[in-house]
Amino acid sequence: MSPRDHHRITATLRAQYREAAAASDSPRCRELAEKMAGLERDNGAAAEAVYALGFALEMLGERDQARRQYETALIIDRTHLKARRRLALIPIL
């Protein structure tokens, strides 16, 4: 895939994710976040995609899986503030 195609596809996926999130469509958010995570190449974008998947999983009530995604986002980018904040809000059971 060319860099131009990669950029176009990821931009489209991000826009679709924002629309699904605005509509509270958590299953669609999960689907799109999984696609984004598979496409991202740089650490910042990869951490954001993994965070988005964690957020979608959290909204679906899958807190353990969400926690793992937030932890993964922090492994990729230890400064990812949104992942750190969401991780702090999930109770440890």
Image: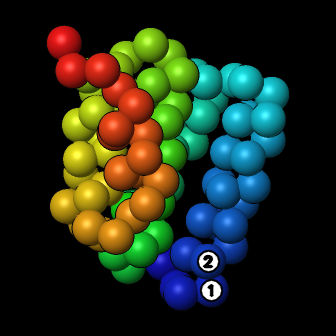
Looking at this view, is 28 or 9 the one in front? 28
Q: Does residue 41 show up? A: no
**Structural distance between the alpha carbons of marks 1 and 2:** 5 Å
Can you name the residue that lies furthest to the bottom here? 3
- Left or right relative to 19: residue 57: left
Q: Position of residue 53 (x, y in %)?
A: 45, 40
Residue at (48% x, 53% y) in the render: 82
Looking at this view, is 39 or 18 the one in front? 18
Q: Which residue position is annotated with label 1?
A: 4
- Image quadrant assignment for residue 69: top left
Mark 1: amino acid = Arg
Instruction: Give the secondary structure at mark 2.
Output: helix
* Mark 2 crowdedness (10 Å alpha carbons): few <14, some 14-19, many ≥20: some
Mark 2: amino acid = His
Instruction: Give the secondary structure at mark 1.
Output: helix
Q: Which residue position is annotated with label 2?
A: 7
Residue at (42% x, 46% y) in the render: 85
Q: Position of residue 15 (x, y in %)?
A: 75, 55
